Image: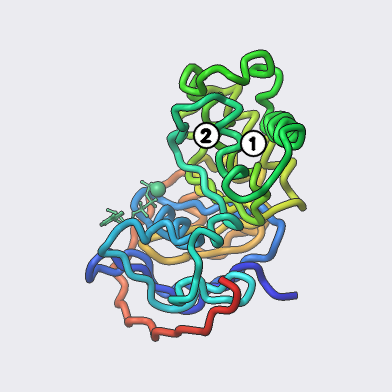
């Protein structure tokens, strides 16, 4: 079976400095993958590579190949909007538009699909139920989303991302600044997405990764130190750095030599 994402000799740069180096990994479809690792290890930089969100930084460069469904998304022919339709993203802080709750959910849907009003209503109800927000907002769908709490706004952001039916959703520490109830709701909804879409999530919360991840990628010093099933990483890790990290101990990161990766560009088809 073809992997959903396949990264080959990937190194990521801001200017001349390689921030993430020599990444070789594949992700299967419809799994929940958690990326963990110390602060500054390159988790967000790697995550933003999956839908080219790093393009917003002019000095950013990706060497190597990032294949999505076999197509190199960094090829010049890639239609980034189309890519982001398939690979949605949710950030640490909720990104809410100054519109109603209803219009926030439908923001991407209206741009991508032609639908009748009744279908819009169905999408809004379905996705708000999926993110455990429906009961809290069903009587004020036309009120401004800015009036919601941060935890509610984050669930709304996820609803908006899910409403366009992506194949992958990228989450960068989505629950780090949320209350217990909202964080629990987001864990539950990610669990419900298992087997439906692929979730790639960066988290500092090891208990969260333990609870919801199928696979875990442990990053350290800009590289993947170890990756495997959640059971492997948390129960029988192979590397001493992984063992230290999951025990909450400090890691001594050796300064490793860096050999610049070969640049591979494959022809994009369809993106
Ligand atoms: N836009 C940027 N320009 C230059 N350097 C950057 C930029 N964004 C991140 N970096 C650097 O890249 C390195 C990795 O950052 P990144 O945000 O990917 O780490 P992280 O593992 O997500 O950390 P955290 O857990 O704190 O969020 C850091 O040294 C950071 O300073
Ligand atoms: Mg980060």
Instruction: Please name the residue that numbered disc 2 is placed on.
Output: 175
Q: How many marks?
A: 2
Mark 1 burial class by Cα count in 10 Å: few <14, some 14-19, many 20+? some
Mark 2 burial class by Cα count in 10 Å: few <14, some 14-19, many 20+? many
Q: Quadrant of the C terminus?
A: bottom right
Choose between 42 and 152: the one closer to the eye: 152
Identify whether 14 is placed above or below 130. below
Residue 241: x percent and y percent?
Answer: 45, 59
Q: Helix or strand or loop: what does disc 1 sit on?
A: helix
Q: At 51% across and 38% down in the image, what residue appears? A: 174
Can residue 134 be seen from the camera position used here? yes
Q: At 76% across and 32% down in the image, what residue appears? A: 118
Q: Helix or strand or loop: what does disc 2 sit on?
A: loop
Choose between 216 and 10: the one closer to the eye: 10
Task: Name the image quarter holding residue 193.
Answer: top right
Identify whether 92 is placed above or below 197. above
Can residue 247 be seen from the camera position used here? no
Are the two marked residues, 1 and 2, in contact with CB atoms closer than 8 angstroms?
Answer: yes
Q: In the image, is the residue at mark 2 within 8 Å of ligand 2 by its beta carbon?
A: no
Q: Quadrant of the N terminus?
A: bottom right
Q: At 57% across and 25% down in the image, what residue appears? A: 101
Q: CA distance from mark 1 to mark 2?
A: 9 Å
Which disc number belongs to residue 97?
none
Q: In the image, is the residue at mark 1 within 8 Å of ligand 2 by its beta carbon?
A: no
Residue 83: x percent and y percent?
Answer: 55, 62
- In the rendered image, the residue lying farthest to the top is 139
State left or right for residue 42 relative to residue 162: left
Which disc number belongs to residue 187?
1
User: Disc 1 or 2, which lies upstream in sequence?
Assistant: 2
């Amino acid at each position: 079976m073809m992997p959903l994402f396949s990264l080959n000799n990937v190194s990521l740069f801001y200017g001349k400095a390689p921030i993430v180096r020599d990444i070789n990994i594949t992700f299967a479809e419809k799994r929940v993958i958690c990326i963990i690792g110390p602060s500054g290890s390159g988790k967000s930089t790697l995550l933003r590579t999956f839908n080219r969100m790093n393009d917003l930084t002019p000095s950013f460069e990706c060497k190597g190949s990032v294949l999505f469904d076999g197509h190199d998304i960094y090829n010049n022919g890639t239609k980034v909007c189309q890519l982001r339709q398939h690979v949605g993203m949710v950030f640490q802080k909720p990104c809410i538009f100054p519109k109603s709750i209803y219009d926030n959910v439908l923001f991407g849907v209206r741009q991508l699909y032609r639908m009748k009003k009744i279908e819009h209503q169905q999408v809004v109800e379905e996705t708000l139920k999926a993110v455990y927000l429906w009961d809290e907002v069903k009587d004020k769908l036309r009120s401004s989303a800015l009036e919601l709490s941060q935890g509610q706004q984050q669930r709304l952001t996820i609803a908006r991302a899910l409403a366009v039916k992506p194949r992958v959703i990228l989450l960068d520490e989505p629950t780090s600044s949320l209350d217990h109830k909202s964080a629990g709701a987001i864990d539950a909804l990610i669990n419900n997405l298992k087997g439906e879409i692929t979730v790639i999530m960066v988290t500092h919360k090891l208990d969260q990764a333990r609870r919801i991840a199928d696979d875990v990628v442990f990053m350290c010093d800009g590289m993947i130190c170890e990756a495997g099933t959640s059971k492997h990483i948390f129960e029988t890790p192979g590397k001493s750095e992984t063992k230290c990290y999951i025990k909450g101990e400090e890691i001594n990161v050796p300064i490793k030599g860096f050999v610049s990766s070969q640049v591979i560009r494959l022809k994009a088809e369809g993106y």
